[in-house]
Every structure is written in structure tokens, then in C-alpha cells.
Image (cartoon, rainbow, N blue to C red):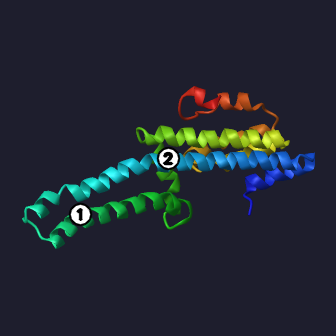
């Protein structure tokens, strides 16, 4: 029912006696995550609708003038849509296949490649760092010590290339180093302001 992150968060809140407030914070956290996903889907509706309409409208003059039959019109419209749907399915399923499917051994290379893509890479970096810092804030607010909170927050980062950059932080925190001091020594991806 709960992830490792959720369990640590609720366990610490239970120990401090502030379980109700932490449930509300956790609900807000997941509601914001769901809202962002809905916004992305809503922004994709118009381009997809225009693409589908264009696919049906473009060969329409040939059907009206009698240059093609109804079957030819359907072939010209439905076959490209089928290919686009198959391609979209592969793109949507690809991350899941890398996370838990047959492509799992190639996930690290795939994650490194994602970060190098022009626009998508910056978005991937921002999203993973946002997940890391917001998770860390929730854990610290619940009363989890930094040395225990950081590894659990790091598990919310799904990009292995980014996670590898932070791999030495938990050990340094266990030795008593401050998080800010450790972060200054890391070869972190992206602009420096992404850390703050």
C-alpha cells in the first residue's frame, strides 16, 4: 500500500504524534503530482486532435471528387493513425519496460541518453531534482534525521544517471558531513541553481 518513502514518512510522523498533519501533507504532495500529470495530458489533447483531424481531412478531396473509393480513403486515414498509435504506445511503455521489463539491464544507459536530449533532458533533470528535494523536505519535516532521510528521498529519483551523481552523499552524511558541503564537491548535472 505504501512505498518505502511513504512508510518512513508516516513512521516518523507517528513517532512524533503528528500523523494527521503528515497524512494531509502527503495527500497534498500526491495531489500536486497528479495535477501536474493531468496538465501535461490536457496540453497534449489539442495537438493530438489537430493531427487526427488533419489525417482525415487531407485525403478528403480525393474521396469527394471520386479519385478514390471509400476503402482507399479509410486505408489512407486509418493506417497512419494506427502507426501513430503504435508509436505512442511504445513511447509511453518504454519507461516501464526499462524500469521493470526486459529492457531493465539497459536502464542506466537509457537514463544517461535521456539527459542528453535537447529539451527533454532539461525537463527530466528538473523533474527528478524536484522529486528529490520535495521528498527530502517532507521527510525532514516529519522528523526523520538527515542521514536516514536522504537515501529514502534519493530512491524517489527514477533516473539512474542522476541517482549515481548523488551516490556518495548518504555515506558522507553518515560520517557527519553537512549536506551543503557534500553537494559542493559533487559533479552534479545541470545549472548550479538546480541545487537550491
Q: Which residue is mark 1?
A: 77
Name the quadrant of the N terminus: bottom right
Residues at marks 2 and 1 touching, judged by CB atoms closer than 8 Å: no
Residue 21 seen in the figure: yes
Q: Measured from the top left, where is residue 87 in percent x and y? A: 36, 60
How many numbered circles does the render carry?
2
Helix, strand or loop status at disc 2: helix
Outermost bottom residue: 71
Q: Is residue 133 left or right of residue 194?
A: right
Kindly identify the residue that appears in the image at 28 percent across and 55 percent down: 53
Query: Residue at 53% across / 32% down in the picture?
Result: 190
Q: Quadrant of the C terminus?
A: top right
User: Which mark is drawn over residue 128?
Assistant: none
- Residue 16: which quarter of the image? top right
Q: Which mark is residue 40?
A: 2
- Which of the 4 image quarters holds residue 176? top right
Q: Quadrant of residue 189?
A: top right
Q: Residue at x 48, y 48 (%)?
A: 42
Report crowding for label 1: few under 14, some 14 to 19, many 20 or more residues within 10 A (C-alpha). many
CA gap between label 2 and label 1 equals 27 Å
Residue 174, can we see it?
no
Image: 122 above or below 64: above
The image shows residue 93, relative to residue 116, as above or below, that is below
Q: Nearer the viewer, residue 161 or 17?
A: 17
- The residue sitting at 56% across, 64% down in the picture is 100
Front residue (pair 134, 171): 134
Residue 78 point in image, percent of width and height: 26, 66
Amino acid at each position: 500500500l505504501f512505498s518505502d518513502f511513504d512508510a518512513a514518512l508516516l513512521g516518523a510522523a507517528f513517532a512524533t504524534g503528528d500523523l494527521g498533519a503528515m497524512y494531509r501533507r502527503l495527500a497534498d504532495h500526491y495531489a500536486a503530482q497528479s495535477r501536474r500529470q493531468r496538465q501535461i495530458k490536457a496540453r497534449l489533447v489539442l495537438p493530438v486532435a489537430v493531427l487526427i483531424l488533419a489525417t482525415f481531412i487531407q485525403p478528403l478531396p480525393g474521396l469527394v471528387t471520386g479519385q478514390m473509393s471509400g476503402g482507399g480513403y479509410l486505408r489512407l486515414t486509418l493506417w497512419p493513425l494506427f502507426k501513430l498509435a503504435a508509436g505512442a504506445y511504445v513511447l509511453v511503455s518504454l519507461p516501464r519496460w526499462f524500469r521493470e521489463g526486459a529492457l531493465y539491464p539497459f536502464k542506466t544507459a537509457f537514463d544517461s541518453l535521456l539527459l542528453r536530449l535537447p529539451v527533454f533532458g532539461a525537463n527530466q533533470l528538473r523533474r527528478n531534482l524536484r522529486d528529490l528535494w520535495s521528498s527530502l523536505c517532507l521527510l525532514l519535516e516529519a522528523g526523520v534525521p538527515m542521514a536516514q532521510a536522504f537515501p529514502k528521498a534519493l530512491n524517489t529519483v527514477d533516473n539512474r544517471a542522476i541517482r549515481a551523481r548523488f551516490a556518495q552523499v548518504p555515506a558522507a552524511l553518515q560520517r557527519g558531513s553537512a549536506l551543503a558541503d557534500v553537494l559542493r564537491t559533487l559533479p552534479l548535472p545541470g545549472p548550479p541553481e538546480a541545487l537550491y
